[in-house]
Image (tube, grey):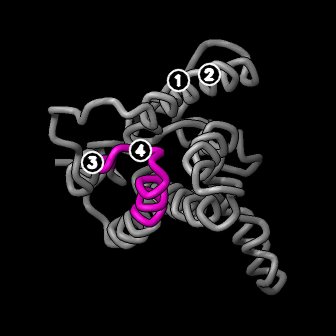
């Protein structure tokens, strides 16, 4: 995100960088403490005052909505980068999930899913994410890395299963997550029979995000 903000003029760049710092802190604190984490904990992690957060966001819900947009945009960018930079088509999916495991604090759905109402910016970001993921999945299907029934929603739900919070040191947790990633990828490309269960649709994944 810092690279994306580098072209902005001074004050705008500083404000954008501060936003990213707060959003990263919010993601970490929500992952560690859950939805009931106080805004003061987010402020402390970000190294800012609570008042500065409330000047930017009207409350925890607005902060969480911005966090959702930021996280979804990041995943869309990651998917596009993996398609364009992976050395082979066979490496695209592993590159995506490997970077996700090392760059992400963890999935947001277990914390924010079902708590927040529908939001136009989240909908916009989710549409762009679906396009980016589907392009990546199409490459993987053509490379016989995943079965034909594999979907963009499968990618998102696999991020939840691959990145549970473990009560161990971070580097070791990533090693363990990566071990199971390798097992998963071997299974996907192994020519296993098509699952009898209907694959998740994108709208089904979106429903998990939205509150009722």
Q: Which residue is mark 2?
A: 179
Label 2: element kind: helix
Q: Nearer the viewer, mark 2 or mark 4?
A: 4
Asked if residue 136 lies left or right of residue 97, the reply is: left
Against 123, is 189 above or below?
above
Give the position of the N terminus as an image quadrant.
Answer: bottom right
Are circles 2 and 3 on residues that touch, CB within 8 Å? no
Against 211, is 77 above or below?
below
Give the distance between the C-alpha atoms of the residues marked 4 and 1, in whole angstroms: 13 Å
Q: Residue at x 44, y 28 (%)?
A: 187
Residue 203 on image: x %, y %: 21, 56
Q: Determine which quarter of the picture holds residue 113.
A: top left
Are circles 1 and 2 on residues that touch, CB within 8 Å? yes
Give the distance between the C-alpha atoms of the residues marked 1 and 2, in whole angstroms: 7 Å
Q: Which residue is mark 4?
A: 146
Residue 16 on image: x %, y %: 70, 71
Q: Which residue is mark 3?
A: 149
Give the distance between the C-alpha atoms of the residues marked 2 and 4, in whole angstroms: 18 Å
Residue 68 on image: x %, y %: 45, 55
Callout 1 environment at 10 Å: few (<14), some (14 to 19), or many (20+)? few
Q: Which residues are magenta?
A: 134-150
Give the distance between the C-alpha atoms of the residues marked 4 and 3, in whole angstroms: 8 Å
Are circles 4 and 1 on residues that touch, CB within 8 Å? no
Give the distance between the C-alpha atoms of the residues marked 2 and 3, in whole angstroms: 24 Å
Q: Which residue is mark 1?
A: 183
Q: Residue at x 49, y 53 (%)?
A: 143
Q: In this view of the protein, which residue sits in the foreground, 189 or 164?
A: 189
Give the distance between the C-alpha atoms of the residues marked 1 and 3, in whole angstroms: 19 Å
Q: Nearer the viewer, mark 1 or mark 2?
A: 1
Callout 4 environment at 10 Å: few (<14), some (14 to 19), or many (20+)? many
């Amino acid at each position: 995100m810092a690279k994306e903000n580098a072209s902005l003029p001074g004050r705008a760049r500083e404000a954008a960088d501060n936003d990213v710092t707060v959003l990263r802190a919010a993601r970490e604190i929500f992952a560690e403490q859950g939805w009931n984490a106080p805004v003061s904990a987010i402020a402390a992690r970000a190294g800012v005052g609570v008042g500065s957060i409330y000047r930017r966001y009207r409350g925890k819900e607005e902060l969480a909505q911005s966090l959702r947009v930021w996280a979804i945009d990041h995943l869309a960018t990651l998917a596009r980068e993996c398609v364009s930079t992976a050395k082979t088509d066979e490496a695209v999916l592993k590159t995506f999930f490997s970077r996700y495991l090392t760059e992400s604090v963890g999935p947001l759905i277990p914390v924010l899913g079902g708590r927040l109402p529908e939001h136009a910016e989240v909908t916009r970001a989710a549409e762009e994410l679906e396009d980016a993921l589907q392009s990546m999945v199409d490459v993987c299907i053509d490379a016989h890395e995943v079965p034909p029934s594999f979907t963009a929603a499968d990618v998102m739900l696999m991020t939840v299963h691959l990145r549970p919070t473990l009560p161990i040191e971070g580097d070791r947790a990533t090693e363990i997550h990566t071990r199971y990633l390798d097992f998963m990828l071997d299974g996907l490309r192994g020519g296993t029979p098509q699952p009898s269960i209907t694959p998740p649709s994108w709208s089904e994944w979106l429903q998990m995000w939205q509150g009722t």
